[in-house]
Amino acid sequence: MGKLTTHVLDTMHGCPAAGMQLALWRLDADAPQRLKVATLNADGRADAPLLEGDALQPGRYRLVFDVVGYFRARGVALPDPAFLEQVPLDFGIADALAHYHVPLLCSPWAYSTYRGS
């Protein structure tokens, strides 16, 4: 059974991004559809897969991470406007039976991602 998961690490503080909010979107030919909103737990993960089973379909998706909200909540002094605010990651799911893990490593000034396991 396939699933979509994520994990966010705060590289500024060297810890999981507990409390960061994110939204998952399905990008269709018509209009994007918001599928889920989640707040990351103490380990920087959603409490359950973002999609799994029949809900995980091949197609194009977007995860939007509220980086500025997270760092402001941690008391980080940021300029206005902040360099990074919402970080969108667009990705494709080709195999609905596979595990797609989309990690984010972030600071207020940089981010990186990859397909994890």
Image: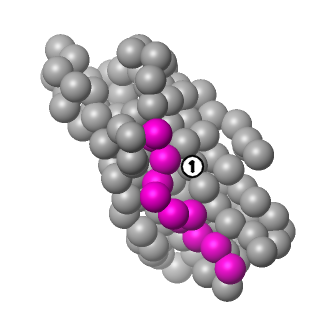
Q: Where residue 108 sits in the image (x, y, percent)?
A: 36, 20
Q: For residue 46: magenta?
A: yes
Which corner quadrant of the image does residue 61 belong to?
A: bottom right
Tell me what residue is drawn at x 18 percent, y 14 percent.
Answer: 77
Q: Evaluate whether residue 23 shows in this view.
A: yes
Please state if 63 lies on the left or on the right of 58 as rendered. Answer: left
Tell me what residue is drawn at x 58 percent, y 70 percent.
Answer: 51
Q: Evaluate whether residue 109 shows in this view.
A: no
Which corner quadrant of the image does residue 37 belong to?
A: bottom left
Which secondary structure class fits the magenta region best?
Answer: loop
Quadrant assignment for the N terminus: bottom right
Q: Where residue 55 sits in the image (x, y, percent)?
A: 61, 81
Tell me what residue is drawn at x 73 percent, y 42 percent.
Answer: 116
Tell me what residue is drawn at x 50 percent, y 30 percent.
Answer: 9
Q: Where residue 31 sits in the image (x, y, percent)?
A: 47, 75
Q: Where residue 56 sits in the image (x, y, percent)?
A: 66, 75
Frontmost residue, 98 versus 94? 98
Which corner quadrant of the image does residue 99 belong to?
A: bottom right
Relative to 4, say whether 72 is above or below.
above
Please state if 50 lies on the left or on the right of 83 as rendered. Answer: right
Q: How crowded is mark 1: few (under 14 residues within 10 Å), some or many (20 or more)?
A: many
Please state if 34 lies on the left or on the right of 76 as rendered. Answer: right
Relative to 9, say whether 20 is above or below.
below
Q: Mark 1 points at which residue?
A: 6
Q: Find the magenta span and give its range.
A: 43-53
**Looking at the picture, which amino acid does disc 1 mark?**
Thr
Element assignment for label 1: strand
Relative to 25, say whether 8 is above or below.
above
Q: Which residue lies furthest to the front in this view?
A: 42
